[in-house]
Amino acid sequence: QLQLVESGGGLVQPGGSLRLSCAASGFTLDYYDIGWFRQAPGKEREGVSCISSSGGNPNYADSVKDRFTISRDNAQNTVNLQMNSLKPQHTAVYSCAAGNPRLVLFRSCASFEYDYWGQGTQVTVSS
């Protein structure tokens, strides 16, 4: 059974940093396209950053460009999201998802294109 587990969330002050990790069991993440998504209370889920299995440049939401960095650690079978200069509006439940490879260099963050989802980890940015 394919499972994704997120970790690294928590409470951080504005301007701080967190590193989220998405770990897999039952499959290797480097085969799949991977996305990070978030959902804030009362809001729809939105794509934060997505990365293709084919290499190429990651896709970032405009609101997180130059703040967040997605990366693969194939040795650890994880995909990480480094979040810097956090703001209160970044507060949300962050989830990772895996999608069957689409063999493109620039991966869409449309959530319906992703097949396997983790439970999410809470990120709270507050003083």
Image (tube, rainbow, N blue to C red):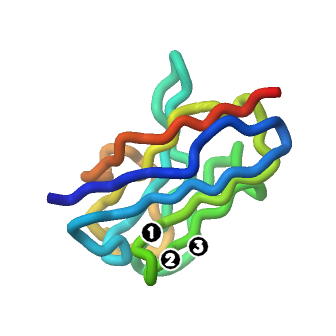
In the rendered image, which residue does mark 3 sit on? 57
User: Nearer the N terminus, badge 3 or badge 1?
Assistant: 3
The type of residue carrying mark 2 is Asp
Q: Residue 78 appears in which quarter of the rendering? A: bottom left
User: Nearer the N terminus, badge 2 or badge 1?
Assistant: 2
The type of residue carrying mark 3 is Asn
Along the viewing direction, whichever of 29 and 33 lies nearer the viewer: 29
User: Nearer the N terminus, badge 2 or badge 3?
Assistant: 3
- Mark 1 residue element: strand
- Mark 2 residue element: strand
- Mark 3 residue element: loop
- Residue 52 placement (x, y as % from top left): 44, 70
- From the image, state whether disc 3 or disc 1 is nearer to you: 1
In 3D space, how far apart are the residues under numbered discs 2 and 1 (Cα atoms)? 5 Å
Q: On the rendered structure, is 8 left or right of 27?
A: right
| Quarter of the picture holding the C terminus | top right
Give the crowd class for mark 2: few <14, some 14-19, many >=20 residues within 10 Å.
some
| Quarter of the picture holding the N terminus | bottom left
- Count of numbered circles on the image: 3
In the rendered image, which residue does mark 2 sit on? 73
Q: Residue 81 appears in which quarter of the rendering? A: bottom right
Q: Is residue 120 above or below residue 33?
A: above
The type of residue carrying mark 1 is Thr
Residue at x 25%, y 52% (from the top left corner): 115
Q: On the rendered structure, is 69 left or right of 14?
A: left
